[in-house]
Structures are given as C-alpha cells and as structure tokens.
Image (cartoon, rainbow, N blue to C red):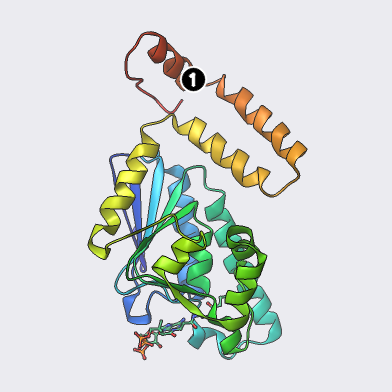
Amino acid sequence: MPYTYFTLETADRVTVVTLRRPEALNALSTAVLAELDAVIGELETIEASDAVILTGEGKAFVAGADIAEMQGFSAEEGRAFGEFGARVFRRLERLKKPVIAAVNGFALGGGCELAMACDLRIASDKAKFGQPEVGLGITPGFSGTQRLPRLVGVAKAKELIYTGDIIKADEALAIGLVSKVVPAEDLMSACHELARRMVKNAPRAVAHAKAAIQRGMETDLDTGIALEHGLFGLCFATADQKEGMGAFLEKRTPVFSGK
Ligand code: CO8
C-alpha cells in the first residue's frame, strides 16, 4: 500500500520501514502518526517478514512531535494528541515480531519515545538522543516518562528529562538506551545482520518470547512466570517446535515454516 510518509521494503524475511519527511526532520504530525498506525497494521499482516527495521530518511531518525502543529493546541487537544501517539507506539511495541530501531540521526522527544517503543536500538555514531520537551513548556507526551526510566533507571531518566540535555550515541550506549553504536555507513548492514540472526529462528517462538518479556516486565514476577509458562506451552502446539527439536536430533539445520 502506498504511503505519503513511509516506504516498506521486504526481503529475506525482514521489512525495512523508512519514515520519509526529511524536510521537517521526520517530525511526527497527526498525519504521520495516522500513517504509522496503518503501517503497523500492514506489518501485522506481512507473512513474508518476521522482523522489522525502523529508520528515518536524512539527518534525523525523528526530531520529535510536530512543534508547528502542537503550538496552538488547547489542553484537550494536547491530551488527545498524546493519547493518540502513545496508542500507536503501544501497538508497535506489541507487534508480534521484533522491531529494531536503526537510529540514523536525531531521536529527540517523540523520536526518542518512538525508538524506545521498539525492541532495541542500534545507533549510528551520528545519532543524538534526548527528551527536550521541558524546554518547549511541555512534558514528554508519548510515554517517555514511563519508558525512559524503565530503560535507563529513574535517576538518569530524571536527569535527561529535567535538563532536556541532548546526548551523543556513545553516552546513549553507556546508559543502556542503545545496544550498539556503529559508524553511520554501517548502520543498515549492522541492523540487517542482527535481524538475520533473529529470523533464522522459529518466528512464533520469537513472538512468544517477545510477549513474555514485554508483558512480564509490566507485571510482578509470579504473574510474569505464569505468563511464560502459558506461552512456553503454546510453543508445543507449533509445527516449528517439532521441526526444531527433530532437526536437532537428526543433526540437521531446521527449516521453519512459521506454523
Ligand atoms: N517539529 C516540527 N518541525 C521540526 C521539528 C519538530 N519537532 N524539528 C525540526 N523541524 C523542522 C524545522 O522547523 C526546520 O523547518 P524549516 O526548514 O521549515 O525551518 C527543519 O525541520 C529543519 O530543522 P532545523 O533547521 O532546526 O535543523 P538543524 O539541523 O539546525 O537542527 C535540531 C536540528 C537540533 C534537531 C532542531 O531541528 C530541533 O531542535 N528540533 C526540535 C527538537 C525537539 O524539541 N523535539 C521535541 C519536540 S516535542 C515532542 O516530541 C513531544 C512528544 C510528545 C508530544 C505529546 C503532545 C501532547
């Protein structure tokens, strides 16, 4: 399906989603968020793909929510915009395949929040991260106050959010906001290499592992362990479990069907 702001390319079981609004540093307007919602809907249905790489065109991953659009908002409009963005990000976070953020440049405000809604983040050495919202007179509004402390700890999240400091990729790595920093020219190949190591596995097992981690991190340990049991059990209803274990016993490489 053609989009105004996104392109999708699927090859070798990986879909690359590129946000293309470089003239506004890929800022998230209502129209961009609505398309992102539709893109996620499409990703849910692409059977040829088991992993997603999300990146931005130009010098930004995403430089935030669209300041020009937000400037005249009433309190009610601000709340509705925040709720909409947060709902779209939550849908991305719950996608039943891993999503790697290939952070090519600025990931600020809503852009940092979007990267945090992905499963993990690989940064170009040119990437910059921050939650500069308080400098604009607002708080983070697409769940940054919730995901940032969960990712980097409460004190560091408070420091970043209260100061609005912009940090470079190496500091983002040091605080655990990103998994790896690579030279800009190697960013996409590094993300593809990582995705390849995921999609060689049984897709449903990876999806169940994602659900167990994601939902488990949002609850207490006993509930999380019970969730894991349920999802672990479901794996035994898949053809890929039989194939994976059969291949091991027959000393051959498994051929997974995603069933
Ligand atoms: N929104 C709209 N337009 C933007 C944004 C943005 N977030 N960021 C950049 N642009 C536009 C610029 O206005 C400029 O447009 P034009 O060419 O028409 O003047 C164009 O993109 C290029 O930007 P710059 O000329 O500023 O590029 P520089 O390389 O000089 O600077 C920066 C790059 C440092 C990234 C700079 O653009 C910047 O500071 N951008 C804003 C960063 C920011 O504050 N982001 C947070 C926004 S708030 C937010 O994300 C809240 C999320 C939750 C919202 C919930 C709402 C209720």
In front: 140, or 31?
Answer: 140
Q: Residue at x 63, y 84 (%)?
A: 138
The residue beneath circle 1 is: 241
Relative vertical location of residue 44 with respect to residue 133 in this rendering, above or below:
above
Residue in the picture at 35% in, 45% down: 194
| Percent x, y of residue 55 | 36, 62
Determine whether, in the image, residue 186 is placed left or right of residue 157: left
x, y percentage for residue 108? Answer: 47, 75
Q: Residues within 10 Å of mark 1 (few under 14, many from 20)?
A: many
The one nearer the camera, 25 or 48, is 25
**Relative image position of residue 236 (x, y in whole percent):** 57, 19
Vertically, is 198 above or below 56? Answer: above
| Residue 140 visible in this rendered orientation of the protein | no
| Residue at 42% from the left image edge and 52% from the top image edge | 100
Q: Is residue 12 left or right of residue 94?
A: left
**Seen from this angle, which residue lies furthest left?**
185
